[in-house]
Structure formats: structure tokens, C-alpha cells
């Protein structure tokens, strides 16, 4: 799992009790694993590299859309997210885009909801579990096929 967040990795891991395979901190601070929110191309490159290196069938958890919008105009962020969604889908992966309530205006939210399916927590957990199981089974088949 790749996590993109406004939170530093240590805080995110402490809060969610999960250790991601890779972590990207959205920040203007020049630090390892941090990506400046104005550099959408670098963010996209890092995510695509993760997809390629892991052969797809991974989970990309993305939070901090509102932070990207502070540093970029909404159409640029929407285009970035739509492109990212297409790359994730073409790699048989799952993109979870977390949007807290009331952080976007209604027009922005409706634009994103045309491309992203809103899901309840239970349904999302089931989909994530299926991806994890499929990846584990595929890993076992590759090991036994060697």
C-alpha cells in the first residue's frame, strides 16, 4: 500500500496502526519522502513508479486533496486525480481518495464524484480485503511456480 498524506508518516502510522509499503508526505518542507504540493508531476511520477515496481494490484490511499487545491487551481488538481485514477485502474489497483466532509465546495465535490465512486466504509473494507487476498494468492502462486 502507498499512502499519500498531509500527515507525517510516523503520525499516520500511529493514528491508523498500519505500516504502508511506501509513504509520501505532502509538504513544502524539503525532506526525504516529501513532495511539494505545487509539483503534481513529481507526485504522479512517484505514484506511477510505485505501481510499476509492485506490478500493479496495489492500494493507493490518498488524502490531502484540499491541500493540493491551496497551491494549485482546482481544474489542475482534478485533471491530476483523473489521470491518476486511470493509471491506477490500468494497473489493476485501487485508489482510495479520502475527502473529509465540507472541505470542497459543492461544484468541486460534484466534479470529483462524477469520476470517483463514493463508498461506505464497510464496502470499502471489503474491496480492500479482496485486493489484499488476491495479491497474497498471486504471490503464493509465483513462489510455487518458481
Image (spheres, rainbow, N blue to C red):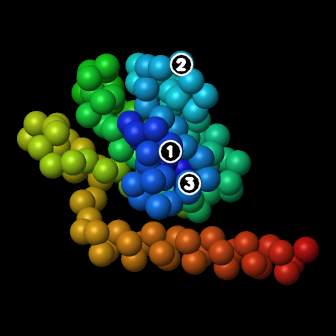
**Which residue is disc 2 drawn over?**
30
Question: Is 127 in front, or is 66?
Answer: 66
Decide: few, some or many residues near mark 1? Use Cα within 10 Å; few <14, some 14-19, many ≥20.
Answer: few
Residue to which mark 1 is pinned: 10
Pick whichever of labels 1 and 2 is earlier in the sequence: 1
Residue 60 in sight in this render:
no
**Who's the residue at 24% across and 68% down the image?**
120
Q: Nearer the viewer, residue 27 or 84?
A: 27
Q: Quadrant of residue 142?
A: bottom right
Expressed as whole percent of the image width and height from the top left, the position of residue 85 reads 42, 47
Describe residue 76's horizontal placement relative to residue 129 as left or right.
left
Q: What residue is drawn where x is 39% and y is 77%?
A: 126
Q: CA distance from mark 1 to mark 3?
A: 11 Å
> Which one is nearer the viewer's eye here, 34 or 108?
34
Residue 134 position within the rendered picture, expressed as x and y whole percent measured from the top left: 59, 75
Secondary structure of the residue carrying numbered label 2: loop
Q: Secondary structure at mark 1?
A: helix
Amino acid at each position: 500500500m502507498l499512502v499519500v498524506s498531509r500527515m507525517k508518516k510516523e503520525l499516520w502510522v500511529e493514528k491508523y496502526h498500519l505500516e504502508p509499503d511506501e509513504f509520501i508526505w505532502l509538504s513544502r518542507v524539503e525532506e526525504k519522502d516529501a513532495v511539494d504540493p505545487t509539483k503534481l508531476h513529481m507526485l504522479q511520477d512517484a505514484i506511477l513508479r510505485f505501481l510499476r515496481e509492485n506490478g500493479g494490484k496495489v492500494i493507493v490511499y490518498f488524502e490531502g486533496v484540499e491541500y493540493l487545491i491551496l497551491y494549485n487551481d482546482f481544474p489542475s488538481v482534478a485533471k491530476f486525480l483523473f489521470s491518476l485514477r486511470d493509471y491506477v485502474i490500468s494497473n489493476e489497483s485501487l485508489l482510495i481518495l479520502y475527502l473529509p466532509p465540507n472541505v470542497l465546495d459543492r461544484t468541486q465535490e460534484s466534479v470529483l464524484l462524477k469520476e470517483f465512486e463514493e463508498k461506505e466504509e464497510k464496502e470499502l473494507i471489503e474491496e480492500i480485503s479482496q485486493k489484499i487476498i488476491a495479491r497474497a494468492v498471486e504471490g503464493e502462486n509465483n513462489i510455487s511456480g518458481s
